Image (cartoon, rainbow, N blue to C red):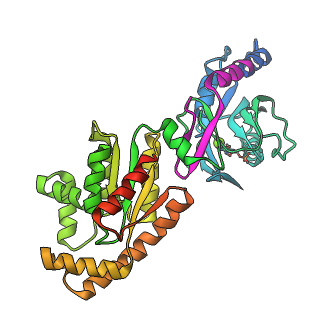
Amino acid sequence: MKNRVTLLDKSFKPFISNEQIEAAIDAVAQRINADFAGCTDVPVLLCVLNGSIIFTGELMKRLDFNCELISMKLSSYQGTESTGKVRQVMGMTGDVRGKRVIIVEDIVDTGHTIEDLVHIVRERGASEVRICTMLLKPEVYKKDIPLDYVAMEIPNDFIVGFGLDYDELGRNFKDIYVLDPEPDYHVEDKSIQTMKYYILFGPPGAGKGTQAAAMAEKYHLCHLSTGELLRKEIADGTALGLQAKALIDKGELVPDEVVEGMIENKFQSTQGVEGFLLDGFPRTTAQAKALDQMLAKRNECVTSVVSIMIPDEMIKERIRHRAAIEGRADDASDETINNRIKTYHEKTEPLVDFYQKAGKYAEIDGTGTIEEVRTQVFALLDTF
Ligand code: IMP
Ligand code: MG
């Protein structure tokens, strides 16, 4: 069992081990087997998708009487709060008329879902309805409907694993984890994280490129600049490159999925580094969320944002200086410079807030010399 898992913006700690879950399922299956021993009818197990899939499988393989399996899909949760409104997303996959039905649920919380289910199954003409749930939160269960078989009772906390999800993630964990409302991110990163994922922020002219090269070398990081990656894909004539080129030639932006796909490929294909330094991605809160999701799938998370800051006046000064030396077209006029500063503020500021809330934002004063800034950057990275 991992000491901590991160899904999207939330952190979870160990709660119920797979061994404990299996033992509880053994016990509940034994009770059901005793109650149905010698039955001549063929009772129906109704698996409530998606959460109950794993529990239903584990339960069913322990049952020793003839039974059928059908499923249906309901949904009442959004994020970590029960909405109280249950939607029937997918109808029942089989007939229950005249049959004994055991509704198999992953978890009963307020009981809205189970109440609706019992109602639906009765309406469909089942001769008897029983309820079997892997988990029950007795503190919040508000209904009078008796729960015939409960494998485990838990306090009113939000959990994931063994079929249960947080926004569709975490169902695959074989143990159950509980939400940790105040995680210590630094402890978390050190204990489970094998790879580092740094995000480099900073306005044009802050010296990102210079510092990125030094960071990549000293800390064995792969520097992923989305601009450079796109140019390389185009030059190599890859499918992704062709798609990107078509859009860029039409003057359109390369969509998020394309950039995200490119980054994900790089995470997968890059070997022998200790981490990644993302430059130019994420650019929007939507991309930041997509990145969290991408990393969560790998049981990883963002280590820290490294933000190199200089005041607007210095941005202009440095860009003018660079224009004089390099003659870059996008550095030329005051109007373009101002526009870039404006875009930078509009796009980047929401991200600062996003990562600050996650406790993953670190800002470095970029006004000093290259060496001065580098010393600060290294001092920061040494803490991770
Ligand atoms: P109820 O209708 O409030 O009883 O909620 C039942 C449904 O909410 C379950 O079938 C789950 O899908 C979901 N749910 C309740 N508690 C949790 C939890 O702690 N983690 C994940 N999903 C939960
Ligand atoms: Mg469910």
Residue at the spot 50% in from the left edge and 60% down from the top edge: 355
In-image side of 83 versus 240 (left or right): right
Magenta region includes residue 17 = yes
Residue drawn where x is 22% and y is 74% of the image: 251
Magenta range: 1-27
Depth check, front residue: 108 or 300: 300
Where is residue 200? Give x, y as percent: 36, 59
State whether residue 280 appears in this view: no
Q: Residue furthest top?
A: 38
Above-or-below relation of 248 to 140: below
Q: Is residue 196 above or below residue 370?
A: above
Determine the quadrant in which ligand 1 lies: top right
Q: Residue at x 17, y 78 (%)?
A: 323
User: Is residue 92 rendered magenta in the image?
Assistant: no
Disc tally is 0
Residues 102 and 14: in front is 14
Q: Residue 343: give x, y in percent of width and height.
A: 36, 77
Residue 163 coordinates in the image, percent (x, y): 59, 36
Residue 95 visible in rendering: yes
Residue 139 place in picture, x, y as percent = 83, 43
Check the image and report above or below for 42 versus 369: above
